[in-house]
Image (tube, rainbow, N blue to C red):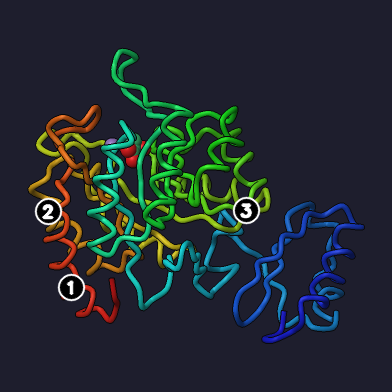
């Protein structure tokens, strides 16, 4: 649509396209609305569409992913949660918290410290995707309740993982951002269901997914009506054994070329090593990441999952402050 056209103009066009049996998906930007149309091309007369009032241009999108593509929407998508902006050129969004929710006391301790540091979004898994069935699987609903009361007490937003589509309602109720873990990136039924809500989704890259597959996973969510997807690079599997995963930072500037969606980096799972988190966080900010998600536990050695990679609140506080200079150097703020 032309710059500044009112939403009603788009609505008329959407109705007309629907009558033809096509699937129009509006993407509302700050400056303009883009209507992505999915369906049989022979139902469309490009000339007719182009002549409609309010339409600036009609174009074909050649990429396999359409709605997430920068070809479709040039303007970056900004997703705001609890006053934190993902995708804003001026800001680096931060999420921190333990791998798993373990107890009221553990969450209270970590939330108190993180709040002091300046964190507004608290992470913590209640449903945990563990490699083996005998490892701690998370506290489930009980964990969600702990998360919610902790977040309320400290006025924080909640980021937590949804593992199974059957838990969507309860996770939706207890979160501000729903995380889709790396192992679920291609759980297409889960992605489709997440398209039916409006809550922001943190979609982690699968350990062996290509960037195209990653963007197609996001496309599933957008195509079902939820435009609020935050991508997350968390490292991929390679032959390298010295780090837990290989943190593929080139994903960040490349995704920025291909998509309008925000992308953040998880240096914790990306390296699996505490000693590498500061350096990789700095690198992530320098290469244009919209944010970071970092694991912090009040007592990492005792953690029920990912003990070796979690930072103490003090270690995190130091790193957080050191990141500010890098953010400033690239015109952003933490
Ligand atoms: C996590 O965030 O704790 C997690 C399990 O991450 P990933 O899905 O990236 O492995
Ligand atoms: Mn973890």
Eyeballing the image, is 72 above or below 305? below
> In this figure, which residue is indicated by the disc labeled 2?
314
Q: Secondary structure at mark 3?
A: loop
> In this figure, which residue is indicated by the disc labeled 1?
326
Q: Position of residue 264 (x, y in %)?
A: 35, 58
Q: Nearer the viewer, residue 315 or 293?
A: 315
Eyeballing the image, is 233 above or below 9? above
* Position of the C terminus by quadrant: bottom left
Disc assigned to residue 198: 3
Q: Residues within 10 Å of mark 3 (few under 14, many from 20)?
A: few
Give me the residue at 30% from left, 60% from top: 119
- Label 3, label 1: how far apart the Cα atoms are: 33 Å
Give me the residue at 38% from left, 45% from top: 150
Label 1, ligand 1: CB separation under 8 Å: no
Q: Secondary structure at mark 2?
A: helix
Mark 3 against mark 1, which lies toward the viewer?
Answer: 3
């Amino acid at each position: 649509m032309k710059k500044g056209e009112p939403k009603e103009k788009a609505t008329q066009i959407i109705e007309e396209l629907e009558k033809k049996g096509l699937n129009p998906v509006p993407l509302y930007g700050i400056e303009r609305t883009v209507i992505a149309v999915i369906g049989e091309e022979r139902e469309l007369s490009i000339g007719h569409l182009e002549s409609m009032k309010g339409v600036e241009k009609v174009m074909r999108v050649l990429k396999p992913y359409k709605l997430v593509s920068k070809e479709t929407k040039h303007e970056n998508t900004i997703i705001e949660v609890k006053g934190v902006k993902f995708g804003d050129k001026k800001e680096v969004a931060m999420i921190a918290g333990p791998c798993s929710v373990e107890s009221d006391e553990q969450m209270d301790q970590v939330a108190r410290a993180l709040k002091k540091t300046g964190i507004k979004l608290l992470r913590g898994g209640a449903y945990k995707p563990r490699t083996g069935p005998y490892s701690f699987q998370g506290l489930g609903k009980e964990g969600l309740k702990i998360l919610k009361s902790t977040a309320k007490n400290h006025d924080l937003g909640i980021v937590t993982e949804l593992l199974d589509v059957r838990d969507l309602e309860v996770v939706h109720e207890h979160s501000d951002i729903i995380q889709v873990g790396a192992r679920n990136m291609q759980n297409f039924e889960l992605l489709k269901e997440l398209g039916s809500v409006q809550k922001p989704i943190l979609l982690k890259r699968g350990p062996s997914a290509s960037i195209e597959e990653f963007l197609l996973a996001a496309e599933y969510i957008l195509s079902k009506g939820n435009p609020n997807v935050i991508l997350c690079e968390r490292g991929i599997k390679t032959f390298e054994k010295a780090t837990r995963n290989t943190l593929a930072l080139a994903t960040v500037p490349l995704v920025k070329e291909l998509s309008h969606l925000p992308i953040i980096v998880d240096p914790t799972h990306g390296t699996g090593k505490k000693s590498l988190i500061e350096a990789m966080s700095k690198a992530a900010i320098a290469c244009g990441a919209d944010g970071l998600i970092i694991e912090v536990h009040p007592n990492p050695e005792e953690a029920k999952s990912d003990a070796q990679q979690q930072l103490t609140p003090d270690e995190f506080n130091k790193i957080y402050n050191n990141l500010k200079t890098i953010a400033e150097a690239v015109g952003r703020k933490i």
